[in-house]
Every structure is written in C-alpha cells, then in structure tokens.
Image (cartoon, grey):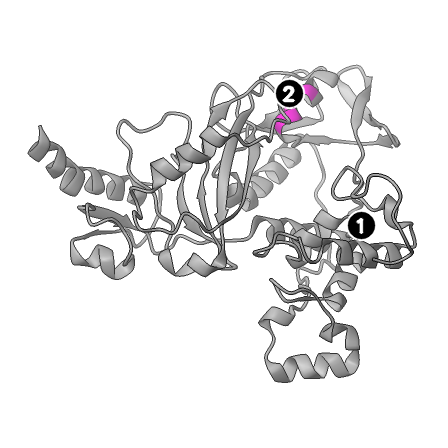
C-alpha cells in the first residue's frame, strides 16, 4: 500500500487536478516534483513528493477590495446606510414595495438579498424563504511580518479523502507581508459566534505544521474567527425568488465567494434584467477610485513633499505599520467613524502590537475630527471606553 499510495500522490493525483483545472479554464497549471518544489518554496517539507503549481493564483486584501468598491459606488451616486437593520417588508400581492428598517422605510422596485448568514431570515420576512443557512465557523491565525520570508505562495495539502464541505484551508501570504494559517470549518448554532478556543488554535498549528515544519509558530500576533453562510446544498444560490416577483436571492456565498464576487455581480445584474429591471447606461460613470496614499509606500522624496503640503503626514500615529495622522483624517473624510473602520482602511492597529500603541491616539483623532466626546467613540459596534476618561486628551 505504501508504494502505491506514493505513486498516486506523485503522479496520478496531480495529473487529475491539472486536468480538472484545465477543464475549468485555469491556464498555466504545472506539476512540479523534487528540487523544483524547494526552489519555489525553500521551507516546504522535505516529505513533499509533488505539487500542483498555479501561477495565475492571486492574493488581495478583502478589506481594501470592499472599501474600494463601496467608495467607488458612492462616487457614482449610491447611498450607503450603515447600522441599518431590516425588520420587515411592505408587500402588495406578490411584490415587495418597501423595506422596513430601524431607521425608516425605503421604497423599492427590486430587492437583492445578499445578507450573508441572515439571508434566510431576510427571505423569511419577505415570504420568500427557500433555504436555510447553517453557520460554519472558520478560525485563522495571523503571524507577524517578521516571518513572511517562510512562505512565497499559497500552500495547501491535498487531503485524502477530500473534505466535502471545505477546501481544507492552508498557509497563505498576505499582500502586506503577514502569513495566515487556516481556516477551520466547524458547524455552529450561533450565527454570531466568532469566539476562538484553545483547541481550535492547536488544531490549526498541528494540521499545517506538516507543510512547513520549521515555521516559527511563536510569532502569532492575532487569531480570529469568521462565520461562513452555507446552505445545505453547499452551493451559491443566485436566482429570483419563487414566490416574490421582485426579490433576488444572492445567498449561500462562501469560499470562493471573494474571487467570484465580480462575476456574481454581473450575473445578478443579468438576473435583474430578466426580472424586468430596465437597465440604462450611466454615461458619466467613473470607474476610478484613488486609494488613500500611504507613508509606508512612499519614497523619502515623496514623503518630504507631502509633509511640506501638510505636516500631519509626518506625524506617525501607528509606528508598526507607519500610518500617519493625515491618512487617518483622509479615512474619516471618506466615511470611517470607528476605530476598526480606521484600522481596515489604513492598517493602524494591524501591526505587531495590535493597536497597543496607537488605538487611543486613533480614538482621539476620531473624537476631534467628528466633533464628538472621546467616550462616545466606538471600536466597531460597542464603545471603546467604559466609564469616565480623565482629562480632555490622551
């Protein structure tokens, strides 16, 4: 059994994966063996017998992608209502005429239900429920940039038998130089359970240590969890509702949901067109959104020029990620109102100390720029401070 299993791993399985990829339109797939594996990944396990190399694989920052898309949408006339909970619908016959929220009612012609783990409950409110979301938690571990050299590509083991409800996770570099291990896949009853347990961390460390045995596992700077939104079909549900004429389901989206997002959007538009929505070209549409300039990406000459224009570019608030006061103010001008919103737009608080140095400084800038008391500043949904704050400044 040993030699046969080894032969399958080295020749048969990679060939099957390559064929499957080619069938799906993935170009440039290569099977690498022996020395070539360690040329690509010097720290990979010496037990590796073969690898499937996909050069077209890409990495993005999901925060930055989301923020960029929202900012561009707002530039082109889209209104965004945050902290607005849908509590019901106004219906006439078999159509939705209005969306009732905790901040008022929005009249509508069509409803796109892309509510993630709550998509089934939103559909229920509209009388359009056709599926059930069963939440699945995924825990990930984030390592310091200091160990970024240990991983050059997205790495994952081919596990046999292949998992039915997950791609299995892996080890991935980020666009900013950190390394992420995970995620796990655990069925949970609570849609908002983002807790992380000791055994979940141990599971990740044990499972992925076989890929890079010498990885410095003592360089963890954060661990966190998110909740996927699968249905029992374990597939995307993108289709018009059966019982409500102007209600479109975009539900059950899990990995590879981020990679699929542009195609999902195009398909959803096509669905709306088929449902009767008249599409009119927006001739003044502007597809370009300028990102917030980053001190960490500037040359010395560029930074000196910025500081001459505004000294706040030289006031570094987050020393781990080299985030300036000017970047934080620009994020606030673009709509950030919480400490975590600043974090996701500028990376202030994402470095080695995880906000130990800069969180209070960010809060003070938010307080000043928004004109609200420091004690009213939110981390994300909850207040950052509990109780009185001594003095006017921190």
Say which of 208 and 135 sits in front: 208
Q: Which residue is mark 1?
A: 337
Residue 87: x %, y % from top left: 80, 23
Residue bearing mark 2? 120
Question: Which sits earlier in the primary sequence, circle 2 or circle 1?
Answer: 2
Any part of residue 92 in sight: yes
* Residue 281 in view, yes or no: no
Give residue 30's mark: none
Using residue 228 as the reference point, say whether residue 319 is left or right of it: right
Is most of the magenta stretch helix, strand or loop?
helix
Q: Which of label 2 and label 1 is nearer to you?
A: 1
On screen, residue 44 versus residue 115, left or right, reads left
Image quadrant where residue 307 sits: bottom right
Q: Secondary structure at mark 2?
A: helix
Residues drawn in magenta = 117-121
> Mark 1 falls on what kind of element?
loop
């Amino acid at each position: 059994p040993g030699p046969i299993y080894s032969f399958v791993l080295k020749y048969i399985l990679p060939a099957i994966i390559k064929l499957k990829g080619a069938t799906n339109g993935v170009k440039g797939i290569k099977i690498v063996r022996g020395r070539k594996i360690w040329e690509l990944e010097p720290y990979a396990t010496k037990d590796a017998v073969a690898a499937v190399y996909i050069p077209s694989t890409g990495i993005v920052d999901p925060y930055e992608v989301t923020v960029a898309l929202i900012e561009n949408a707002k530039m082109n006339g889209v209104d965004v209502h945050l902290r607005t909970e849908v509590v019901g619908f106004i219906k006439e016959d078999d159509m939705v005429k209005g969306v009732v929220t905790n901040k008022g009612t929005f009249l509508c012609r069509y409803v796109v239900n892309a509510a993630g783990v709550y998509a089934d409950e939103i559909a229920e409110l509209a009388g359009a429920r056709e599926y059930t979301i069963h939440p699945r938690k995924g825990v990930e571990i984030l390592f310091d940039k200091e160990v970024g050299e240990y991983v050059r590509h997205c790495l994952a083991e081919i596990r046999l038998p292949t998992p039915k409800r997950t791609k299995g996770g892996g080890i991935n570099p980020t666009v900013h130089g950190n390394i992420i291990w995970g995620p796990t896949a655990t069925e949970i009853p609570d849609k908002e359970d983002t807790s992380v347990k000791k055994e979940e961390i141990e599971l990740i460390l044990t499972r992925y240590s076989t890929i890079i045995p010498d990885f410095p596992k003592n360089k963890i700077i954060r661990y966190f969890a998110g909740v996927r939104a699968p249905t029992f079909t374990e597939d995307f549900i993108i289709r018009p509702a059966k019982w409500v004429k102007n209600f479109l389901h975009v539900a059950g989206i899990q990995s590879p949901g981020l990679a699929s997002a542009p195609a999902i959007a195009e398909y959803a538009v096509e669905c709306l067109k088929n449902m009767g929505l008249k599409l009119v070209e927006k001739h003044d549409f502007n597809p370009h959104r300028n990102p917030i300039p980053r001190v960490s990406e500037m040359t010395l000459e560029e930074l000196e020029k910025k500081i001459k224009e505004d000294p706040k570019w030289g006031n570094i608030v987050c020393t781990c990620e080299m985030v300036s006061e000017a970047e934080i103010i620009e994020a606030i001008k673009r709509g950030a109102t919480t400490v975590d919103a600043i974090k996701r737009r500028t990376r202030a608080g994402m470095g080695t100390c995880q906000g130990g140095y800069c969180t209070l400084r960010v809060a003070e800038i938010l307080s000043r720029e928004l004109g609200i008391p420091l004690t009213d500043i939110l981390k994300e949904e909850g207040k950052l401070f509990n109780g009185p704050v001594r003095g006017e400044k921190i």
